[in-house]
Image (cartoon, rainbow, N blue to C red):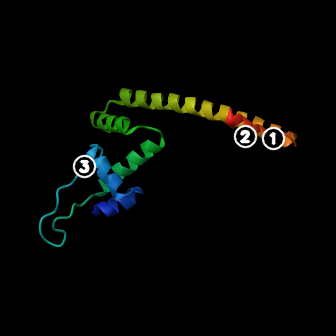
Amino acid sequence: MKSMTIAGLAKAGGVGVETVRYYQRRGLLGTPDRGGGGINGGVRRYTDADARRLRFIRSAQAAGFTLDEIAELLALDATGDRPRARALAEERIAALDAKIAELEAARASLKRLAGECAAGTSGPCPIIAAFEG
């Protein structure tokens, strides 16, 4: 098992050191004790398991989960409560479907406005006019 400093952990997770500290304050990541004496005296050492957990947090955020939901997922993993984990995932899927529908409507409107803009050569641009009103 490889150990790393907080900077190494942050790099492994693709985040900054302050993000790691924030996740620790939120209870999403543990804070290891400082090693005593020797070459690494006073330095917190993180493991590959910490790096995996950090990557899980980042991936879950990318899927749209809030930090509170991520904390719940982590707790559910410890208890094996798959039905609740599945319910959280289904709620996230519904929210993503709603966002996709909203983005598709925005895309269709913008596409229509771009077509109107291309068709006309005089007067106000339909794109600018749409966003002014």
Q: Does 53 appear above or below 130?
A: below
* Foreground disc of the pair 3, 1: 1
Query: How many marks are shown on the rendered structure?
Result: 3
Position of residue 1 relative to residue 52, above or below, is below
Q: Which quarter of the figure has residue 97?
A: top right
Q: Which residue is mark 1?
A: 117
In front: mark 2 or mark 1? Answer: 2
Tell whether 43 sits left or right of 125: left
94 horizontally vs 9: left or right: right
Which quarter of the rendering shows the N terminus? bottom left
Label 1 environment density (alpha carbons within 10 Å; few <14, some 14–19, many ≥20)? some
Measure the C-alpha gap from mark 2 to mark 1.
9 Å
- Residue at image coords 30%, 44%: 28
Q: Mark 3 vs mark 1: which is more N-terminal?
A: 3
Element type where label 1 sits in the image: helix
Instruction: Identify the secondary structure beneath mark 2.
Output: helix
Instruction: Using the image as rendered, state which of residue 91 and residue 119 is in the foreground.
Output: 119
Residue 26 in the image: x percent, y percent?
29, 43
Looking at the image, which is closer to me, 25 or 11? 25
Mark-to-mark CA distance, 2 and 3 = 50 Å
The amino acid type found where label 2 is placed reads Ile
Front-lying residue, 124 or 86: 124
The residue depicted at 62 percent of the width and 30 percent of the height is 101
Q: Residues within 10 Å of mark 2 (few under 14, many from 20)?
A: few
x and y, in percent, of residue 49 in the image: 30, 53
Q: Secondary structure at mark 3?
A: loop
Please give the label number shown on residue 30.
3
Snapshot quadrant of residue 41: bottom left
Mark on residue 77?
none
Q: Which residue is under mark 2? A: 128
